[in-house]
Amino acid sequence: MTMKKGRKVQRLIRLNSKNNNFVEKLPDPFVRELPRLLKNFSEFPTGNLKYDWKVLDDDGFVSWFKTLKKSELIKTNRVKISYMIRNLEAFQFASVWRMTDLITATVNILNNDTLIAGAATSRSAIELTTRYVHASHFFDKYFRDIPWDKLDTHLLELQFYGNPGDAKSLKLVEHEIDRLMWGSRLEETIDFNPELEQTNILTLIRKIDKTIRADNESSQIMPHYEFLSEAAHPNGLGFKRFQEGNPSNIDDIWISLKLSERASGDAADFLRSEIMWGLAFSAYHIPRCFQIFYKLGEFVQNKMGVVLPPRRS
């Protein structure tokens, strides 16, 4: 991969003393590690890097393909794999930068006590992390299982079954990779290119949760994601965040609920803890999955000799 050397992600991302004191008292040992996870993420060396994304031009590829003799079609293996690896590299780096935006914003939100906004940004961080985790493990396995001994002797199919055993679920790997950077849920985009219809994030969360359940059911993503989604939308959970203390009786039929902009009741505390879970989940998994992508790039380069296009002398 082609990169220009940079510095750390940014200045250290820190919780203020109020949030540090809060997180230390949480029952979940994973979330209690949040200050350390934020420090490690801040020091992850991708900040200010420049990535030279080499994109295969559709018209150029078609023109080149038309010049090939039947005996030369085997050359498309290296071009297609290179195209996919370049796109994975771009996703690998751009996702870390995108996560830096989300984590920085969420920490600032926690420090400013504007928790409703934190529900939205922490939820977005969970979505991005889920897609990053799924992509890193899926494509790492896929490319390592390619019959590399046939790279220059057979046309590789480079496809997979979305549902094993279902012939109708056959998909091209390049379309799956294209969706990582270009995928959309907008109708106009899907009408223009149906292959770019993005996979619903809930589908990916359920897939990962099935794996997690066998290991640690308490670490499942969906309960946290659903709570943050509920709080981010104009529903009851979001309004309860402003409730201060317990209701008090006015008379036999009326009660009083104290509301304040920076309430510190049970609802606000629980929302704060859920926002922190989303931060911990993201700060933990993104650097680890970045390394999976990085090692995959090295693996493919070792198998191919060089990932196209070759460097200019």
Image (cartoon, rainbow, N blue to C red):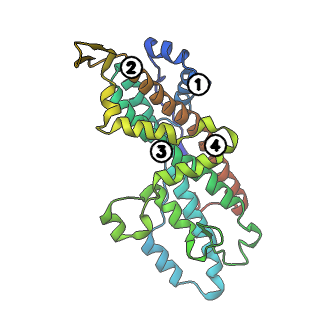
Residue 133 at what x, y percent from top left? 58, 46
Which residue is label 2 attached to? 111
Give the position of the C terminus as an image quadrant. Answer: bottom right
Residue appearing at x 32%, y 33% in the figure? 236
Tag count? 4
Q: Are marks 1 and 3 in contact (CB under 8 Å)?
A: no
Which residue is label 1 attached to? 28
Labels 4 and 2: the sequence-earlier one: 2
Q: Nearer the viewer, mark 1 or mark 4?
A: 1
Which residue is label 3 attached to? 128
Which residue is label 4 attached to? 291
Q: Secondary structure at mark 2?
A: helix
Q: Secondary structure at mark 4?
A: helix
**Quarter of the image holding residue 216?**
top right
Labels 1 and 4: the sequence-earlier one: 1
Q: Is residue 125 left or right of residue 168?
A: left
Q: Are marks 4 and 2 in contact (CB under 8 Å)?
A: no
- Residue 146 seen in render: yes
Crowd band around label 3 with a 10 angstrom C-alpha radius: few (<14), some (14–19), many (20+): some
- Give the answer, above or below, for where 94 lies relative to 244: below
The residues bearing labels 1 and 3 have C-alpha atoms spaced at a distance of 22 Å
